[in-house]
Amino acid sequence: MSMVQHDALARIRADLATCVAVGGMLAAFACAHPVQAGDVAAAASNKPTVVVIGTGGTIAGAGKSSTDTSTYATATVGVDKIVQAVPELAAVANVRSEQVFQVGSKSINDDLIIKLAKRVNEVLKRDDVAGVVVTHGTDTLEETAYFLNLTVKTTKPIVFAASMRPSTALSADGPLNLFDAVVTASSAEAAGKGVLITMNDEIHTARDIVKTNTFKTDTFRSPYGPLGYVVEGKVLFYRNTARRHTRDSEFDIETIDRLPRVDIAYSYSSSDAAAYNAFAAAGTKAIVNAGTGNGNVSDSLVEPLVAIRSRGVFVVRASRTGSGTLYRGPSFKDDDKRGWIAVDDQTAPKARLLMALGLTKTQDVDALRALFTRY
């Protein structure tokens, strides 16, 4: 770091430290706003440009008390304030920020993820932009990130940052997760690896990651482990992604304006066909069955689902377990006979998105089946 960068960051840190002492993290947000633009520019000179796109979520949340780690209002702090509260970013990249929308991710829908994907795609076309960071809520992060992984045609890094604790909480995890995301998005090593997520010092691929706990900061896990880590501002990769994504995907966000309706029905003991029939009546194009074990379908549901398939609605078998491939057993022969589709290891929410994208391309059941081993 140059002496100019060091002095600029020292002034910013001093301003924020005073604010935190007086009124906590939200006060720091307010005090960070007047920091001189020249200071930030000097600290970020000759650095890659990373655009941070805000969508809301807990990382943009605030509580009434510093001990409120689960009770707080989401999507209340603008992305510019979130960026300004982490002055260390200026030593890593020339960071720009913009707000695409501001919602808790529990309320994300297909229209919003399409809007986000289109904007990320546009930003990454700029020659001066090295990568994009998306701040997002944790509830549906795995779905939004996976959708971008399948549709945004780029080799530049796209990195999601989120948090399990609001900005006002003791030991808030958002600032470091954001810092790690910008470090990763600035790294040439992250190029070509598809959409990534930085949480809890780990780097995960959007294809594999799943939220596994309601409140813990290490909630995001992959059944195959992280791709790598971010340690004190250094990116360390140990494995790569194997399935198609981003530039090599056959799906292109520039040609997608809406998705066909695909629904998920959760299987449980004593479940009947009511939900499946309701989805079919509502006009769904496909139903993902989150089945027990190996994506199993109970005996009582076989005939109703065969009837639904005969009406032109696709039936996709996934597992409610959260991980594991649907190993090839007797059920696969039944799939061929019934015209059903089995996923590989995709969770039901990710299978829903992949199936919806597939239906924008084809109605051929064999071609749709092949998607689940290709992506």
Image (cartoon, rainbow, N blue to C red):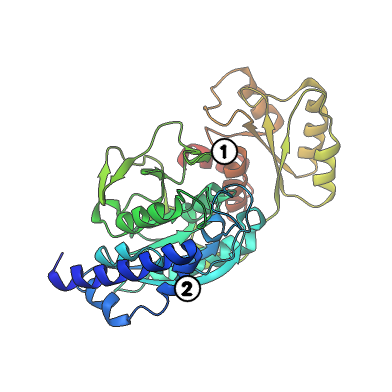
Quick check: 278 left or right of 232?
A: right
Where residue 124 sits in the image (x, y, percent)? 38, 68
Kind of residue sitting beneath label 2: Ala
Extreme left residue here? 3
Where residue 166 sits in the image (x, y, percent)? 53, 54
* Residue shown at the point (80%, 43%) measured from the top left: 311
Helix, strand or loop for disc 1: helix
Residue under label 2:
30
Is the residue 276 above or below the residue 62 in the image? Answer: above
Query: For the residue carrying disc 1, how many other residues have a C-alpha within 10 Å: few (<14), some (14-19), or many (20+)?
Result: some
Quick check: 86 left or right of 311?
A: left
Quick check: 93 left or right of 307?
A: left
Query: For the residue carrying disc 2, how many other residues have a C-alpha within 10 Å: few (<14), some (14-19), or many (20+)?
Result: some
Is the residue 133 above or below the residue 308 in the image? Answer: below
Kind of residue sitting beneath label 1: Arg
Extreme front residue here? 22
Query: Mark 1 near mark 2, Cβ–Cβ under 8 Å?
Result: no
Extreme top residue here? 330
Mark 1 or mark 2, earlier in chain: 2
Q: CA distance from mark 1 to mark 2?
A: 52 Å
Residue under label 1:
369
Is the residue 211 above or below the residue 258 in the image? Answer: above
Residue 288 occupies which quadrant of the picture?
Answer: top right
* Residue 44 appears in the figure: no
Where residue 47 sits in the image (x, y, percent)? 23, 68
* Residue shown at the point (56%, 59%) measured from the top left: 61
- Quadrant of the image for the N terminus? bottom left
